[in-house]
Image: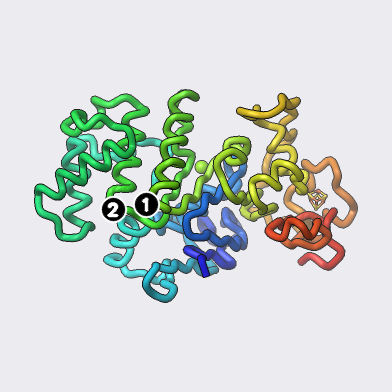
Amino acid sequence: GDVLLEVTGLRVDYGDGPNAVHAVDGVDLVLRRGEVLGVAGESGSGKSTLAYAITRLLRPPGQVVAGEIRYWPTSAGPVDVLKMSDAELRAFRWAQLAIVFQSAMNSLNPVLRLREQLGDALIDHGPGMTPGQRQKRIAEVMTMVGLPTDRADAYPHELSGGMRQRALIAMALVLEPDILVLDEPTTALDVVVQRQILTKIMNLREQLGFAVVFITHDLSLLIEVADRIAVMYAGRIIETSTAKQLYEAPRHPYSDGLLHSFPLLHGPRRVLTGIPGAPPDLRLRSAGCAFQPRCTQAMAACTTTIPLLSATNLPTEAPDHQVACLLYQDGEGR
Ligand code: SF4
Ligand code: MG
């Protein structure tokens, strides 16, 4: 009942024919109202493509070749995001779902002062507001994200990297969306600023109740801030569970490797081993598990059977935990 966004059987290709890259290769995903869903994976795992598809920002040669994306507004039945008209899409993207991408400079208009950009968003997509109400909302949202209101008349280049990122978050939240999609939102910033901004976003989420899809290669960061996590590899989700369960008992050999690839900010020191080898060529469809060439636990069946995401053979006390690995599967893959 509390499902906000549901992705079913999503496939995204870049290009077509024999050279098509299968960037997202059959993803099922549910985002619940108010939760933080983390999507983790190395670069090339399909996680950014997934974000572009969900937000309908995919550009040719990228194309959704199968699947559905349904959004449930509070007041009505589900809406098919992939079938929205351009007008519906513009409204959806501001008022219901907002996006913060990696590079703040790309998404702020360099020739407009902050006040103008925030004001334009309110005029174009917001409820009818008087100029006075708009100025009040601009000051409110700037204060909310920790931007001094006296910076409202600054141009983007006059702001520090951290302030630009806060400005982007202000833009994203100005119309109070249900969903905030973050794609590596702070990686370009230094660690201290990264941390401040993430803490700010998570506090705002508590106050305002929006849901977050947080996409990053840094699994240890997700362990700290996400409620649930989906780990992607070669265009598929290979493990999903609560953040706590994934930290305490990662089941997929790739998740385990990824957890040991980053220092944890809190908790015991770990030996960082990383994962030798590189992700597969996404033009080729493997007959078996895509992780097999890098997997230290691979068996004969792993070269011939594609493991399906399932809860089979996992402890019953973790009902949300699913893994796509033959170590945990009795049945047939595909
Ligand atoms: Fe490793 Fe096989 Fe599991 Fe793939 S299915 S992760 S190769 S054990
Ligand atoms: Mg990316």
Residue bearing mark 2: 175
Q: Which mark is residue 144?
A: none
Residue type of the residue flagged with mark 2: Leu
Residue 59 seen anywhere in this rendered image of the structure:
no
- Say which quadrant the C terminus sits in: bottom right
The answer to whether residue 284 is left or right of residue 155 is right
Furthest-bottom residue in this view: 77
* Residue 91: quadrant of the picture: bottom left
The answer to whether residue 333 is left or right of residue 173 is right
Question: Where residue 237 sits: x, y (%)?
Answer: 65, 54
Question: Where residue 206 sits: x, y (%)?
Answer: 44, 47
Q: Is residue 41 above or below residue 263?
A: below
Q: Is the residue under label 2 in contact with that under label 1 (CB below 8 Å)?
A: yes
Quick one: 84 or 169, which is closer to the camera? 169
Residue at image position (56%, 64%) is 10
Q: Estimate the spatial distance between the alpha carbons at disc 1 and disc 2, rounded to whole Å.
A: 9 Å
Question: Where residue 268 sits: x, y (%)?
Answer: 71, 27
Q: Label 2 crowding class (10 Å Cα cut-off): few <14, some 14-19, many 20+?
A: many
Residue bearing mark 1: 98
